[in-house]
């Protein structure tokens, strides 16, 4: 059985005060039964990781970085490495989030280097994949998601991939209020799981967690989670309100 996983991506939306306030509000309420049945992680801006880590104290909520560079240290002005965020308490790193791919311009090869670097720096990467609206409209969803998944995992053994989570996030559903229907999401998730079976084996395909992301809200979380191959949710906007994020965690439990 795959344990449900709910992740909150705060993007560039919190400041020092609101990061700590949000963390405190989540931790105050999450330690009920729902919180134990679900793996929960939040991804604050880099600057506030330490303050949020302190606010989480000994709770079971994990911390993640929204991005990392693919080298562990050296002359890479402005970059942050896996080992740096690991040292200050991070467990996870997002790799290839659609805003990194489509706003910043990261390609498949760079995303793969980041997945590899996350693992070698001791982090658990969340590899994000997903198609643009024009790709869906021209029936290219499967082709794009297959390419991104294969490229993202390139060169990794099954043992390494057992530390990876995949997030299917159709780009047209991110921050737009448009959510993929549970059927559309399930179809993409099943396709990704089959691909992992094809690339590795049945066991890894059954074990790997695949999260859905794109306008997840308290009102649609339960129906998405009811699908066979949806193992969790990557939440942007709705993770900025403790009440909504907690409701999503409860829906996933
Ligand atoms: P959203 O963002 O929930 O605001 O659509 C999801 C994401 O970018 O991970």
Image (cartoon, rainbow, N blue to C red):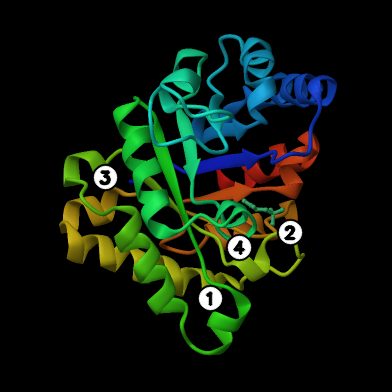
Q: Which residue is mark 1?
A: 184
Mark sitting earlier along the chain (3/4):
3
Q: Nearer the viewer, mark 4 or mark 1?
A: 1
Q: Are marks 3 and 4 in contact (CB under 8 Å)?
A: no
Q: Which residue is mark 3?
A: 161
Q: Which residue is mark 4?
A: 223
Q: Residue at x 35, y 70 (%)?
A: 146
Left/right placement of residue 239 relative to residue 77 reads right
Residue sitting farthest toward the right: 17
Q: Position of residue 31 (x, y in %)?
A: 62, 22
Q: Nearer the viewer, mark 3 or mark 1?
A: 3
Say which element carries label 1. helix
Report, in whole angstroms, how far the alpha carbon at label 2 lies from the one at label 3.
29 Å
Q: Nearer the viewer, mark 1 or mark 2?
A: 2
Report, in whole angstroms, how far the alpha carbon at label 3 lies from the one at label 4.
28 Å
Q: Is residue 209 visible?
A: no
């Amino acid at each position: 059985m795959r344990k449900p996983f709910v992740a909150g991506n705060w993007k560039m939306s919190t400041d020092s005060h609101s990061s700590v306030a949000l963390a405190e509000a989540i931790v105050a309420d999450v330690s009920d039964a729902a919180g134990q049945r679900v793996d929960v992680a939040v991804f604050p801006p880099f600057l506030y990781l330490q303050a949020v880590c302190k606010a989480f104290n000994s709770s079971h909520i994990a911390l993640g970085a929204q991005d990392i560079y693919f080298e562990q240290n050296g002359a890479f002005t402005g970059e942050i490495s896996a080992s740096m965020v690991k040292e200050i308490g991070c467990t996870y790193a997002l790799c290839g989030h659609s805003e990194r791919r489509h706003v910043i311009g990261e390609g498949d090869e760079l995303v793969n280097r980041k997945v590899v670097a996350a693992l070698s720096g001791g982090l658990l990467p969340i590899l994000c994949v997903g198609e643009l609206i024009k790709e869906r409209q021209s029936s290219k969803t499967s082709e794009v998601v297959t390419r991104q998944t294969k490229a993202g995992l390139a060169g990794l053994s099954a043992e390494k991939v057992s530390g990876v989570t995949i997030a299917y996030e159709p780009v047209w559903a991110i921050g737009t209020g448009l959510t993929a229907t549970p059927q559309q999401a399930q179809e993409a998730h099943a396709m990704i799981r089959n691909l992992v079976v094809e690339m590795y084996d049945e066991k890894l395909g059954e074990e790997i967690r695949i999260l859905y992301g794109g306008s997840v809200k308290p009102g649609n979380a339960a129906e998405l989670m009811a699908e066979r191959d949806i193992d969790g949710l990557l939440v942007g906007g709705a993770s900025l309100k403790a009440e909504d994020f907690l409701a999503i965690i409860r829906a996933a439990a």
